[in-house]
Image (spheres, rainbow, N blue to C red):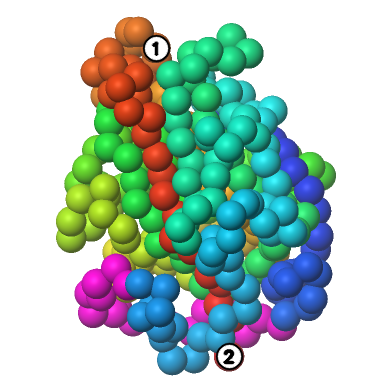
Amino acid sequence: MNMISDSKRLSGFKHLLAWGLGGALLVSAGCGAGAEQPMEEAATKQEEKPLAGWVQIWSDEFDGTSVNTSNWSYVTNVHVNNEQQQYTTSSQNVSVSNGTLKITARLQSNNGYPFTSGRLESAGKRQFGHTRIESRIKLPVGAGLWPAFWLLGHDINTVGWPACGELDIMENVGYSDWTSGALHGPGYSGNTPINSRFYPNSSVANFHVYRTEYSPSDIKWYIDGVLVKTTLKSEVTRYGNWVYDKPFYIILNLAVGGSYPQGVNGATYPYPGVPQSTVDLIRNTPQTMEVDWVRVYQWQ
């Protein structure tokens, strides 16, 4: 998640191959769709269609009544970036209903932290390399709320962060009109030079499809089918090693406060990155990141 990240998680491996579907091996030919696409409406599950050349290899549609633990693990032991939440496994913080995953931040003291929230990771269960990964997400709005949809290299437990690589597909720190994306790796971590703000065509409080495509030569970010940024391998290697030729796992979480929000909103009281207005907002109405689906495609 932008700024200083954590060092965690499990393994799986194979260079230039995608591990998915519980370990089935899927040969990657790289990402072949590079041209900017016309703006799409944020689609329903039935209407969303892949671009020509892409074959869906995995998804979680969140159509059940609970988190599918063959896809996701709850993570509760992460305390980084001066964030102010304790992640839990409680259904008050992570739930599935009416076709969506809901990750909810509450003003609720836990383990010395003023807020509770949720974090799911696909590490060791669903890991992918050189693919198209996307999710349809609706975000809460309030300064200091920090929802994210992002990837970490599967070898983080072996090589550590940032050598494992991090690809932030979508982050938001509580503003309705923009999200951000970034890469973190050896020589370009923390306040990384490889980052950008992206401006959807409507409030982030509406559903939008956030997507990345990563190949041996570049990484692309899209919102609602529109190409918003391309970073070439040659741009990355100006700063350090290119570490994106291996499986990555998916993370969905909602943090509250911390270094990135504070760097934008300047709030120091009552909590770092969380002004009183957001404390009052969460007290009155717990704030939810809602995820319609997550899908992964292979280029063929």
Q: Secondary structure at mark 1?
A: loop
Query: Image quadrant of residue 13?
Result: bottom right
Which circle, 1 or 2, is nearer the viewer?
Answer: 1
Q: Residue at x 81, y 60 (%)?
A: 12
Q: Is residue 100 above or below residue 59?
A: above
Foreground of the two, 240 or 181: 181
Number of other residues with Cα within 10 Å of mark 1, as a class: few under 14, some 14 to 19, many 20 or more? some
Q: CA distance from mark 1 to mark 2?
A: 48 Å
Q: Is residue 76 left or right of residue 65?
A: right
Locate residue 2, reporting x and y percent.
46, 39
In this figure, which residue is indicated by the disc labeled 2? 300
Foreground of the two, 231 or 290: 290
Foreground of the two, 292 or 213: 292
Task: State the predominant SS element of the stretch in magenta.
Answer: loop
Verify whether residue 65 appears in magenta: no
User: Magenta region: which residues?
Assistant: 27-43
Locate residue 166, reporting x and y percent.
57, 49
Q: Is residue 118 above or below residue 33?
A: above
Given the image, on which type of amino acid does mark 1 rest? Answer: Tyr
Q: Secondary structure at mark 2?
A: loop
Q: Which quarter of the rendered picture does the C terminus lie within? A: bottom right
Q: Residue at x 35, y 19 (%)?
A: 283
Q: Residue at x 78, y 78 (%)?
A: 25
In this figure, which residue is indicated by the disc labeled 1? 271
